[in-house]
Amino acid sequence: MRIGILMGGRSLERDVSLRTGRRVSRALSELGHEVVEFDVDESLVPKLKKTPLDLVYIALHGKFGEDGTIQELLEILDIPYTGPGVYSSTIGFDKALSKQIFLRNGIPTPPFFVLSEATFQEMGAVAALSVAGQKLGFPLVVKPVAQGSALGVRIVKEEEELPEAVRSALHYDDRVLLEKFVEGTEVAVSILGNRDLVALPVVEIAPHGGFFDFDSRYTLGATDYYCPARLPEDTSRRVVEAAIKAHRCLECQNLSRVDIIVDHAGTPQVLELNISPGMTESSLLPLAAEAAGMDFKQLVGRLVELALEKYS
Ligand SMILES: Nc1ncnc2c1ncn2[C@@H]1O[C@H](COP(=O)(O)OP(=O)(O)O)[C@@H](O)[C@H]1O
Ligand SMILES: [Mg+2]
């Protein structure tokens, strides 16, 4: 097959996307496909219109790659693509919307408030911050509503740090999420499938320096991973159930990776769902696949199969 691969682009996660993209590109070639690489810029759509492709592999992360934008363009151009569609992408990239949907479907997610930049500029919302902080309790987590790779995410220990953390998150998006800090075990569950779903073994994430920030993710040795996670069997089962439920209620196809913190009561608190999880050497999905006996090439092959199945 002739497979186009979209990577890079102008998102803040450009470098991670290039690493994902090059690795996937190599695997696709080894699987015998003809690969055409596209580093996303303003020439993309004209190029796509000129290049006959059987499938596009989306190796983009972050804005435009994960938020439904590129998916919508590919729908317009009638080009089949990997991963979830427009609906799941639009909601999955929006942590505020996702969390509302999780709650309505009985999926536990940490308590939260969302404020937009406009409420600060036009309504003096800064005066509401201390109230929000008291309601959620400290420490709490401040993050941009729509961003990835932990960019703009801060753990705020006391009220005085709150305005600055909010300002910083607003550099990444025009809405900010204040979320209750959950103490416990951080895990990620990758789900593969369209109708029949397979959950890959749960990956436990143990960053050396506190939380799973950008450097803990992409610096070799900065985080310990355990796969399968060191959780009691029934807790693991509940984690997988929560992830599958999240995948289903966002109507994902092909794949997703659900980020969860298991609190001290053993409840899986779902943080977010990723529709284009990283595929770098240190990423969670390939690690989970490996634990399930699927090497990187087989994983990429499976994602291609699942994408084609979606269109058949
Ligand atoms: N409510 C929370 N309690 C504790 N840690 C959190 C919480 N939310 C996020 N984190 C930490 O911040 C990281 C990034 O948060 P996440 O919501 O997954 O956003 P991103 O899209 O940037 O991955 C998580 O991997 C976790 O380490
Ligand atoms: Mg995450």
Image (cartoon, helix red, strand yellow):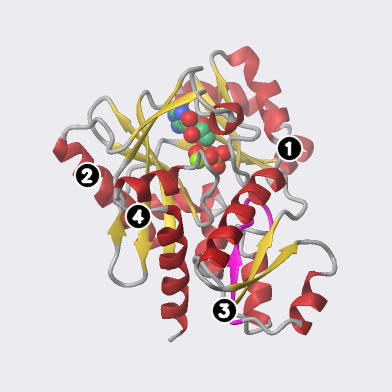
Disc 1/disc 3 C-alpha distance (Å): 45 Å
Q: Which residues are magenta?
A: 54-64
x, y (%) of residue 121?
78, 37
Q: Earlier in the sequence, mark 3 or mark 2?
A: 3
Disc 2/disc 4 C-alpha distance (Å): 24 Å
Disc 1/disc 4 C-alpha distance (Å): 53 Å
User: Magenta stretch containing residue 128, yes or no?
Assistant: no
Q: Amino acid at mark 2?
A: Arg
Q: Secondary structure at mark 2?
A: helix
Disc 3/disc 2 C-alpha distance (Å): 34 Å
Which circle marks residue 238 in the picture?
Answer: 2
Label 4 Cα crowd, 10 Å radius (few <14 / some 14-19 / many 20+)? some
Label 2 Cα crowd, 10 Å radius (few <14 / some 14-19 / many 20+)? some
Q: Secondary structure at mark 3?
A: loop
x, y (%) of residue 279?
53, 50
Q: Pointer 3: what residue?
A: 80
**Main SS, magenta residues:** loop
The quadrant the C terminus occupies is bottom left
Q: Earlier in the sequence, mark 1 or mark 2?
A: 1
Report the mark closest to the observer, 1 or 2. Answer: 2
Which circle marks residue 289 in the picture?
Answer: none
For the residue pair 127 and 304, the one nearer the viewer reads as 304
Label 3 Cα crowd, 10 Å radius (few <14 / some 14-19 / many 20+)? some
Q: How many marks?
A: 4
User: Magenta stretch containing residue 55, yes or no?
Assistant: yes
Q: Are marks 1 and 4 in contact (CB under 8 Å)?
A: no
Q: Are marks 2 and 4 in contact (CB under 8 Å)?
A: no
Disc 4/disc 3 C-alpha distance (Å): 24 Å
Q: Secondary structure at mark 1?
A: helix
